[in-house]
Amino acid sequence: MRHAVIMAGGSGTRMWPMSRKMRPKQLLRLFGGKSLLRRSFERLQAFLPAEQIYVITGGDYIAPMREELPEMPAGNFMAEPCARDTTNAVGLAAHLLARRDPEGSMGVFTADHIIEPVDEYCETVAQGFEVAEQYPDALVTFGVKPRSAHTGYGYVYRGSKLGDGIYEVQQFVEKPDVPTAERYLSSGEYYWNSGMFAWRLPTIIEQIRKHQPEVDAGLCEVVADFDDPEKADSVLARFSSLPKISVDFAIMEKADRVITVEMGCRWLDVGSWTSLAEIFEPDASGNTLAAPNVQMLDSGGNIVVSESDHLIATIGVKDLVIVHAGDATLICDKAQAQRIKKMVEQVQSASDGQRYM
């Protein structure tokens, strides 16, 4: 059987003050009145029943995510004991699924992407599952066909061709500088690393065991006691002791065999407020408006965000990020948006800072 797991554990700090501890960016309804989590679920539901779709996230997020996705069985929400990066999230989900379906297949998807059109996405994901089942020794990654020399994404260097849009992977490469990204784009041999995968459950478990034995040993102990409420403290202690490392570094770059399936869809990683400029159509002055009530006078190149009908009015301002979020408002130069994490730290350290987190 095929299973799809949505990884939805990120806190979305770079999208503060709208993204908060109990309402991370995956739940913000900024995209056609829908959250990123719901959009991810609906894409998968186009070819899989809700019973075969799962969400893995932090324990604090389980309740609001169940409210967001009432169609999913309550038991399909997996609570990480704590955040320990994607290797441990993937490994935990794989072990829990293997208890239900030891020979099944698993797809891993994220809750912070805009992907269109959905029908092409579904065809590509179905192809990825087929490849994982055809080549049971391989881990499959979805490589997005690049549309620009983007320096904010990792890349996948493809190798020999196995079929239409299907290639062996030669190498994973980190975020490049501009000249390198331009070379990747012009070569036609590199894909953006989407962070989405497909594999057979026995294969990913074996690859974790082989390349990260410490993680494997810890996960086996965690899963053995996972459903016992009396052992919750020991599960948390064991899980929190696991090495914090991404699945790309820990597994994909070391795996015995990796195959990439080309994804030609429009794919955008919603990682910050500035990424909205790639999603929403700008107005005549280059403003990106993700807010229902905005008035602008001699203003251009701004990103304005709000979920409420609160009026936001600007006069003579350019290249700002303006986010209204109830009890907090952020105003920053677009060129300084990477410093939002620093501002979050500063707010947290204030005497009443936790009320804004």
Image (cartoon, rainbow, N blue to C red):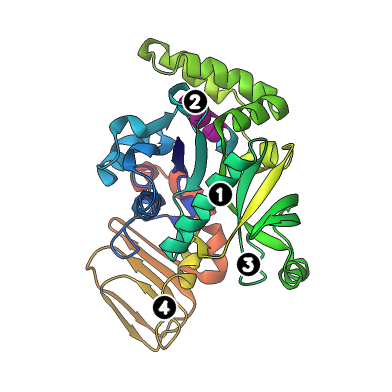
Question: Mark 3 or mark 4: which comes first in sequence?
Answer: 3
| 261 relative position to 42: left or right | right
**Which residue is labeled 4 in the image?**
281
**Chain-order first, disc 1 or disc 4:** 1
Identify the residue under disc 3. 146
Q: Nearer the viewer, residue 47 or 295?
A: 47
Image height check: is 336 above or below 260?
Answer: below
Q: Is residue 92 magenta?
A: yes
Query: How far apart are the two marked residues, 4 and 2, measured between alpha carbons?
Result: 43 Å
The residue that appears at 67% across and 39% down in the rendered structure is 138
Residue 98's tag is: 2
Q: Residues within 10 Å of mark 2 (few under 14, many from 20)?
A: some
| Front: mark 4 or 2 | 2
Q: How many marks?
A: 4
| Residue nearest the viewer, comparing 128 with 251 | 128
The residue pinned by badge 1 equals 128
Amino acid under label 4? Answer: Glu
Q: Of the residues shown, which amino acid type is indicated by label 2?
A: Ala
Q: Residue furthest top?
A: 230
Look at the numbered discs 2 and 3 and tell me whether their residues touch, using CB distance below 8 Å.
no
